[in-house]
Amino acid sequence: MKNYINPLIILSVILLVVSCSDDFLERPPESEIIPEEYLYEESQLASYTVNLYGILPTHGNWSFGTFGIDADTDNMADMDYDNKYVPGQWRVPQTDGSWSFGNIYNINYFLNTVLPRWENGEITGSEEGIEHYIGEAYFFRAYEYFNKVQALGDFPIVTETLVDEKEVLTEASKRNPRSEVVRFILSDLDSAATMMMGTSPDGNKNRLSRYAALLVKSRVALYEATWLKNFKGTAFVPNGSGWPGAEKEYNQGWQYEAGSIDAEIEWLLDQAMIAAEEVAGAYSLTPNNGVLQQSVSDGENPYVNMFSAEDMSEYNEVILWRDYDQGLGIVHNVPVYAMLGNYGVGLTKGLVDSFLMENGLPIYANGSGYEGDDYISEVRENRDDRLWLFLKEPGQVNVLYNEEAGTHVTPVEPIPDITNPSWDQGYSTGYAIRKGLNYDGAQANNGQGYTGSMVFRATEAYLNYIEASYLKNGNIDGTAASYWRAIRERAGVDTDFQKTIAATNMQIESEGDWGAYSAGQLIDPTLYNIRRERRNELFAEGLRWMDLKRWRSLDQLINNNYHIEGFKLWAPMQEWYDDGILVYDSGSATVSSPTRSEYLRPYEQTGDELVYDGYSWTMAHYLDPIAIQHFLITSENNNLESSPIYQNPGWPLTANEGAQPINN
């Protein structure tokens, strides 16, 4: 079939190539490039594709960067709630939305231009370098398409830069079923893995490599396998009951390439395992020596430092990271926020409670040794190192070097400022983390931080393999067991994961972990502990929302509201605060009332909050709505039903309306 690019968002290739700012590798922009003479040299290919690195998550200047992406999940909460948890408040937009093709157009321009020239031997430079940068383009097209699949599901596959003719574009706007799109993504990632070098060509892990493609391949394949498994039979998978794509003639007779949805799931799990195992075999885990450095005489801990280093290339498991440079003005503010309340993004009680004790037992199990949560110090005691190391507590040292160098230094962790509504200064839940904190005060000049930003690390591949192999085989095979033990050993937790599984009470776990559910039902303890390991290892790294969606872990909120909670305010810790600061039960309340919970509830203070009675859910919110603009562009006489595009399940063809309930 032909492919579609919306004429309203087609970008000028001339503008693109003339403005190639090289943020990721810190090179000055190309200038005065004549398009007819461009993309004939290896260096020009490198300059063009480095422009695409902005597609990847990195630290922004006035935010908590990648560490804040997990906000608005059961892991982390910021200073305001998200309307997706208030059915009826997330509405169909008139314009814009996730249905866009700008990045895809730019990548296709590169591939459509470069591939024929390369095949004809018209590009100068090393063959290895030329192939690598072509591989980067394949990678970014795959990555952008994966973003579309997560947001929208079915989506048109675009491989050409089309002419701006409505008839052609309308015909080409047909949505490919999501499984077809995922096959396309995996094919592009295979091309990327084949063409890219085994190590980053810059020698510093600031550019992609074969292993980045393989890691993302394992991520994509696992995502789609679990989506198909958990949404099987519903409107959210091709040929499921109520699938809106079935209403379009062009989808009649469509079948999964593997022959059935079950066969497709098996194939995807195989792909995830193969790719993940290759990555895990190439990258060892960065060691954790258990040291929380609090003085210059303490030994450094590479596992802690890895997340806030100026140079991340030296760490074993790092596959790709972004480099910053204060001298070039490529900076961010993450170190400043890491010394306070994380730009108002706090850990939830649910996440904190999920971490095991160092003896491998859940906190509620007999003999666990849990000290309780009256104080943050007790919460951390004898816990998984990932909590003990990364959960801050008042009085800990934030700066060890150059304290005088930074204008916004917070040398000692303060009492959590839970009544301050400022994102800069406030603590949303009372729990703040150390990921992103650099002990050098020179990093704490406002907006002038230059610590690195992690993009991909190999531990995810270990976790992807464990989950995929269990779903496929129904047991923990030898490879998965070795990966699981390695992760737990690095975390300072008893490596006997079967001991943990045997002690797991799913009803208790479900109280604070949405991942305890799939399709509204509690999962088995082994699968749950695989998900727990992933949650505890990757928290604050931007993957939680992706996981919750593919696991279908929000159905239970439809009938049972969930209350986001933080630390145990109404206990001894309330004595940290001066009289009159903790105001509740009024329109000017600064904290939630003790009659609602002993634990701080950041969105339940005044009673005016739309989530005052907790988070809720509706099935349609698993996918984004498509803006009405796109139906109008491709319709006849403004008859939206005539458009070859179809709306996502539960979303109406009317702007500014919320989703309708779906019986799935």
Image (cartoon, helix red, strand yellow):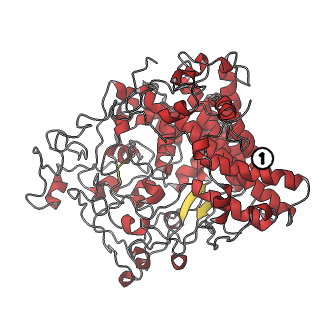
Looking at the picture, does residue 589 appear above or below residue 656? below
Q: Residue 382: x and y, percent?
A: 38, 54
Res. 436 visible in picture: yes
Q: Residue 7: x and y, percent?
A: 61, 42
**596 with respect to 439 (left or right):** left
Q: Nearer the viewer, residue 83 or 632?
A: 632
The structure residue drawn at horizontal position 40% and vertical position 45%, both measured from the top left corner, is 75
**647 with respect to 568 (left or right):** right
Q: Residue 356: x and y, percent?
A: 42, 46
Count of residue discs: 1
Res. 318 visible in picture: no
The structure residue drawn at horizontal position 73% and vertical position 33%, both measured from the top left corner, is 2
Q: Which residue is mark 1?
A: 191
The structure residue drawn at horizontal position 34% and vertical position 51%, both measured from the top left corner, is 78
Q: Amino acid at mark 1?
A: Ser
The structure residue drawn at horizontal position 22% and vertical position 59%, both measured from the top left corner, is 420
